[in-house]
Amino acid sequence: MSTTTAVSPRTGGMTKDERFVVFASSLGTVFEWYDFYLYGSLAAIIGAQFFSAYPPATRDIFALLAFAAGFLVRPFGALVFGRVGDIVGRKYTFLVTILIMGLSTFIVGLLPNAATIGIAAPIILIGLRLLQGLALGGEYGGAATYVAEHSPPNKRGYYTSFIQTTATLGLFLSLLVILFTRTIIGEADFAAWGWRIPFLVSVVLLGVSVIIRLRLNESPVFQKMKSEGKGSKQPLTDAFANWSNAKIVLIALLGGVMGQGVVWYTGQFYALFFLQSILKVDGYTANLLVAWSLVFGTGFFIVFGALSDKIGRKPIILAGCLIAALTFFPIFRMITTNANPALEKAIEATKVQVVADPKGCGDLFNPVGTRVFSAPCDTARAFLAQSSVKYSTVPGPAGSGVKILVNDKEVPYTDAKTSNPLIAAAVAEAGYPKAGAPGIVKMSNPFDIFRPQVAAVIGLLFILVIFVTMVYGPIAAMLVELFPTRIRYTSMSLPYHIGNGWFGGLLPATAFAIVASTGDIYAGLWYPVIFAAITVVIGFFFLPETKDVDITK
């Protein structure tokens, strides 16, 4: 880790050049996150367009996994572009990454669907997602390093926190464009062809980002290092084959970024998925609810980034992980109470059991969506999970068939793999609401936020965003400060993208698979709770405080 130095605070605000550095780096990263998040926001429609050969439930899983594929390759992008950034420079590396990201997104908007070109459509789509993930793997480390190396020593948390807002602003911008397009052309046309518009619009954003970034100069810290001949010729080896640095990489991952990643993706992506797929809130309303929570919460990235300059990065990040781990379950239950009160009452009042010979019941854990369930016990449980019905599995006599009991009353089961009208009717009679039922939170326009039900849901989502800002606001400054200049880009990018790309990016698909496997709509929350708690323990004992280190060495 870089050595500690005395810090002499600089008075006054940002200089004109510093403002331009922060603006240019942040704006380009906003557009890059916009490109990346478009897919996540439109996962259900993407599934129908490019995975139409599969049943609806499997389409959703495939769509989520294609989204996750971009996260899986992010660490490899971190290695490739991190090495280039430490050898060639920060500026030109993140100029290349934004070009790759922007062009990949634009091509998605032009790509024919599976009905037109068959299996080639999902293959090309996944290929473009992989390119996006590689590009994003190099983007964040470059932008964060570039801004930090331009920042006054006592304001690195504040300056880099503007980079931290970009992921949320990119998500917000993608939701805004989607909502605007949906409102203008209508839901039917949007699902058929209008979903392409937000992807195609990104080429304009790309052009603006490239023009602005071309005006930037190289980082002064990097230029000084190069002029003194202190750069690394083999940054990958120096970063990861040297245990003294590799140890810090591991601590940064497990004691900081892992927990930050799961808290972030729970508070933004899984919350959106939970509203739509589990609570049956319509897509327009769910996107508006999340968008408003981001409007109210985004400024807190800067608040916590600036606060970390005064009290340190470590206490804020670990406090955010701890509070999130302790409160996720009650907050999501309160979201259910306010967003779909009928579902909450049905879960509490209705006892649904699947009675079957245990030997005929398999494991429903299916995060990659490739397993095909054929046993009646498995198809029955899968159907109930997809209907957001809480159920329990009860052992039956050896060799017995499957019985579905709704409040102890047997309902005939016809072993249908995608629908079962008798079970659907029985759970509906017991109080389980269908999508679009009265009582489910609904917004008719973007400014319909003052009704108590809508305001309550936005308030709960806002709390989740606050957790995100606590763990994410100071993380860039901390990662920059942990590593020396000559291998900083490489060293900080890998733990960041493993923590966010793997632990965070795989969260929605894995959490939903846990829900399907257990029959409990809240069980998926154990994923972020456990990993956030692990980060708190490891970070408390091993993660060093970094706010006063000298990053010029």
Image: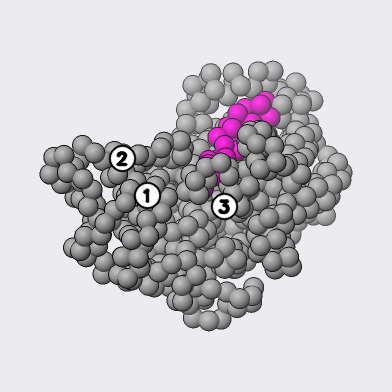
Q: Which residue is mark 2?
A: 375
Dot 1: within a 10 Å radius of its alpha carbon, few (fewer than 14), some, or many (20 or more) residues?
few
**Image spot of residue 439 (x, y percent):** 45, 76
Which circle marks residue 238 in the picture? none
Displayed quadrant of residue 330 = bottom left
**Residue 523 within the magenta-colored segment of the rendering:** no
Which residue is pictured at 65% across the width and 60% down the height?
A: 175
Above or below, comparing residue 506 to residue 181 in the picture: above
Specify the principal SS of the magenta part.
Answer: helix
Q: For numbered disc 3, what is the local secondary structure?
A: helix
**Viewer-side label of 3, 1:** 1
Q: Which residue in the protein does label 3 denote? A: 44
**Looking at the rendering, in which quadrant would you find the C terminus?**
top right
Way the structure is coloured: one colour
Q: Is residue 393 left or right of residue 185?
A: left
Whether residue 269 is visible to the viewer of this picture, yes or no, is yes
What amino acid does circle 3 point to? Ala
